[in-house]
Amino acid sequence: MKKVTFTIVLSLIGVIAVSQSSKTVIKEMNTEKNYPKSLADYNDFKNLVSEVEFYREKRLIDLDEFLRMSQHENTIIIDSRSTYRYKRKHLKGAIHLSFTDFTQQALWDLIPDPNTKILIYCNNNFDGDQIDFTSKISIPRNNKNNETQILSNRKPIMLALNIPTFVNLYGYGYRNIYELDELVNINDPRVEFVGTEVKK
């Protein structure tokens, strides 16, 4: 019996030693990066979002103000959705630069004056067209027994492009930004759309 107990103890010590050794190796792998790091910095992003938060709160406007501002000199409306969606349907007068194409040079070429008033909108501003203005929203789901069930007790997560567009424009040095804050029905007579899918 003592021999069996001794063997079990030795086995446990061995398992613990291997486990500790594995943890040490993993820790060393995590601290010793043997490759160049990508040009992504989460701390830069967090700091930028924190800086933008209160600035953005004062720059949220309703549709009437959005349309009034759009008539001002040195003002543009920018649509940062995909080229495909923009061509199909966009607000009349909006210029286009896909969010995926945001770079310092692309923005300088499109908006050379950093004092330009920039008005932004996106899919989540329009209701009634889930083809060309599909809502960006994550509905929490519960997967049990390979069945998907929408959880009604958890708030959906809004993933609108408005916010990263705002944050990135600010990060690239633009400060005169305003964001459409109203949910507008696609048939609202105050708005005019143009594009390949708009009936003339």
Image (cartoon, grey):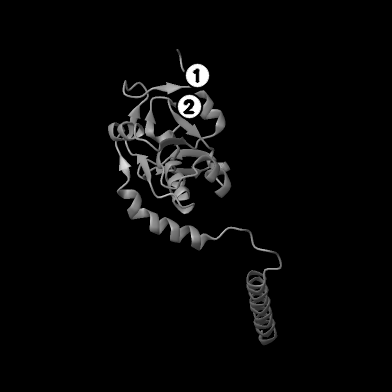
Amino acid on which disc 1 is placed: Glu
In the picture, the quarter occupied by the N terminus is bottom right
**For numbered disc 2, what is the local secondary structure?**
loop
Instruction: Report crowding for label 2: few under 14, some 14 to 19, many 20 or more residues within 10 A (C-alpha).
Output: some
* Residue drawn 48% across the image and 32% down it: 95
Q: Residue 180, image x and y in percent?
A: 35, 37
For residue 11, the mark is: none
* Residue drawn 44% across the image and 61% down it: 47
Is label 2 or label 1 in front? 1
Closest to the observer, 91 or 124:
91
Compared with 109, 5 (above or below) is below
In the picture, the quarter occupied by the C terminus is top left
* Residue drawn 52% across the image and 40% down it: 110
Rendered image quadrant of residue 2:
bottom right
Q: Residue 132, image x and y in percent?
A: 48, 26
- The residue singled out by tag 2 in the image is 132
**For numbered disc 1, what is the local secondary structure?**
loop
Image position of 22 (left or right of 168): right
Image position of 3 (left or right of 163): right
| Spatial separation of the CA atoms under disc 2 and disc 1 | 9 Å
* Residue drawn 36% across the image and 54% down it: 53
In this orientation, does residue 121 appear? no
Image position of 32 (left or right of 155): right
Rendered image quadrant of residue 154:
top left
Is there a contact, CB below 8 Å, between mark 2 and mark 1?
yes
> Which of pointers 2 and 1 lies earlier in the amino acid sequence?
2
Q: Residue 69, image x and y in percent?
A: 32, 35
For residue 197, the mark is: 1
In this orientation, does residue 54 appear? yes
Image position of 82 (left or right of 7): left
Amino acid on which disc 2 is placed: Asp
